[in-house]
Image: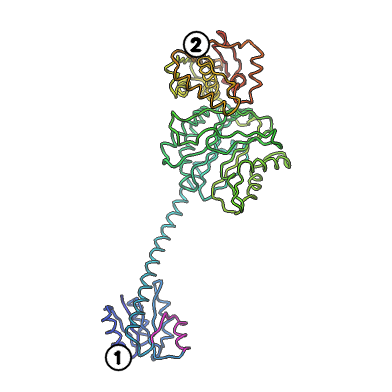
Amino acid sequence: MKILIVDDEAINRTLLTNMLYNAGYKKCVEAVNGIEAIEKFTEEQPDLVLLDVVMPGLSGFDVAPKIRQLAKGPYLPILFITALEDKDSLVRCLEVGGNDFATKPFDRHILIAKIRAHLKIRALSEYVEEQNKTLRLFNQRVAREHSIVEHIFSHAIVNRPEVQAHFNCFLKPAETFNGDLFLCEASPSGGIYFIVGDFTGHGLASAIGALPVTRAFQELTQQGVSVSEIVSELNQILIRFLPSDMFMAAVIGEINAQGNRINLWQGGMPAVIIPAKTNMLLRKFSSRHMALGILEEHELNTDTDTINLGHNEQLVVCSDGLIEISNDDGDMLLEDGLVDIIKEQMTEKGAINAKSLFDRANAHCATSTFHDDVTLVVFTSKPIKMALHSQVESSFPSVHEVVLEAKHLKEPDVLPRVLQLTGQCEGIQGIRSIVYTVLSELFNNALEHGILNLNSKLKRDSRGFQQYYENREASLRVLEHGRIIIRVESLPMKGKVLISVEDSGQGFQWEDKTYLARTRSSNDECHGRGIPLITALCERVWFENNGSKVLCLLSTQH
């Protein structure tokens, strides 16, 4: 440590120099007047100044503020050494920039103690300043990196305006980066794929998972794959890229070209709501799957639900950040509170607007600060209007046939493997998701009813639904005989695809019109949706071999 001693009397300078030397401060610089003190300070940049008050020319009161201006560090201790004892003079020592004072004749122990205390404060101040400098540089670097990442996100995670125009959206991130995700892409069949995702947490750490998800979603939708395939692929990507404590809750759907049917998969998200003014008409579809990025492929259930919408009927999808808004008492809005707000808006406006719905929900909030990201997406049922790029059909006619014996039917991933194989069939790219939906329904019907003889009436409620699938697993375990033959024939010159699924079971009375009527009437229940759904998707559906073989003709023309 270097100390500057300023005093016009040589004896005082010598006394102070010796005293400091004995106390361990070897570097002392002397100045005999105020002008020399300023010069010495500029040259030496000492760590502490001992300054006499009364000197010829510039007094200590004049020198202190000038030295203070020249000081480069955050804290320069200036101690006045003075024979003045009146209160006003001592107060002025502090007012002009001094940090402390010692009156002559000064006590050696007290003066050294004060010097040590002030030098300790200076060292601490320098340390704090260095830390602040490091922190400022760090903040600048982080801000720059955030700016770069934000630029990447804004260009990588973007929806085409003509596609997003079919949705009414509101997104509010809790921080700069959004841990929620909304993507939409046109499907080759003239409809729209969409995904509303919610990653664990919020901010940059959660948002980083959006990049691989976005890329995969865009690539898969261009291929026209099924929702189940998208779910499976995204789950594998998230398991591969994200740490084990991160996952993505999601609603993934495909809207048909007419805008009146949605094939939907929900995992770990709040219920999807179809608004109405009353409880009787309002519909809720709760998530029945785990979030993505948790289960391995053989554990993941990719089954989807089909939701039919009337003209101008709406579908409301939100992340949990909306229903977890809390009031002053800590009570969350929850799904019931959101339903009440939706019914109020339907009564007043006749339709749901995403921003207005958020504002009403926000009125429930105790603070303007949100602890989670909020995403709200509303789709109104009407025909999808987008220009489709017509392509000249140059595919070759092809036939894919798969024969599944009992040992194959027991494998947990048999259906995804069959779908993957048939996806290679030429000429179906534009209706691939429709082909997959039809195949999934036909395969499950053939397995569960033709081979295992299960009764769909068990699925009338949630308890029966669970019992049904327990019976399914038990029957599969003991299955020794049974066969399902799947055949997909592409006829590109005719713009058709012919699908047939045949099982070795006893068939059913498909000619019985009352059976079909009963099936159609149960379309809104948990069972019996298969035949009406397939009929709606295909140009023609017919049965052979006493109902054990079903054939479906689909058009590849949009």
Of the residues shown, which amino acid type is indicated by label 2?
Answer: Ser
Colour style of the rendered protein structure: rainbow
Nearer to the camera, 237 or 108: 108
Density class for disc 1 (Cα within 10 Å; few <14, some 14-19, many ≥20) is few
- Tell me which residue sits at (60%, 33%) in the image: 285
- Tell me which residue sits at (56%, 38%) in the image: 160
Total marks drawn? 2
Residue 147 lies, in percent from the top left, at 47, 51
Residue 534 lies, in percent from the top left, at 59, 20
Q: Mark 2 highlights which residue?
A: 504
Of the residues shown, which amino acid type is indicated by label 1?
Answer: Ile
Q: Mark 1 highlights which residue?
A: 11
Q: Is residue 34 visible?
A: no
Nearer to the camera, 159 or 482: 482
Residue 56 lies in quadrant: bottom left
Q: Is residue 132 above or below residue 553?
A: below
- Looking at this view, name the residue that lies furthest to the top: 545
- Viewer-side label of 1, 2: 2
The stretch drawn in magenta includes residue 545:
no
**Disc 1 and disc 2 in contact, CB within 8 angstroms:** no
Residue 91 lies, in percent from the top left, at 47, 85
The stretch drawn in magenta includes residue 88:
yes
Nearer to the camera, 363 or 387: 363
Q: Which region is colored magenta? A: 87-102
Specify the quadrant that holds the C terminus. top right
Name the element at disc 2.
Answer: loop
Residue 393 lies, in percent from the top left, at 53, 20
Q: Is residue 507 visible?
A: yes
Distance in Å between CA atoms under marks 1 and 2: 118 Å
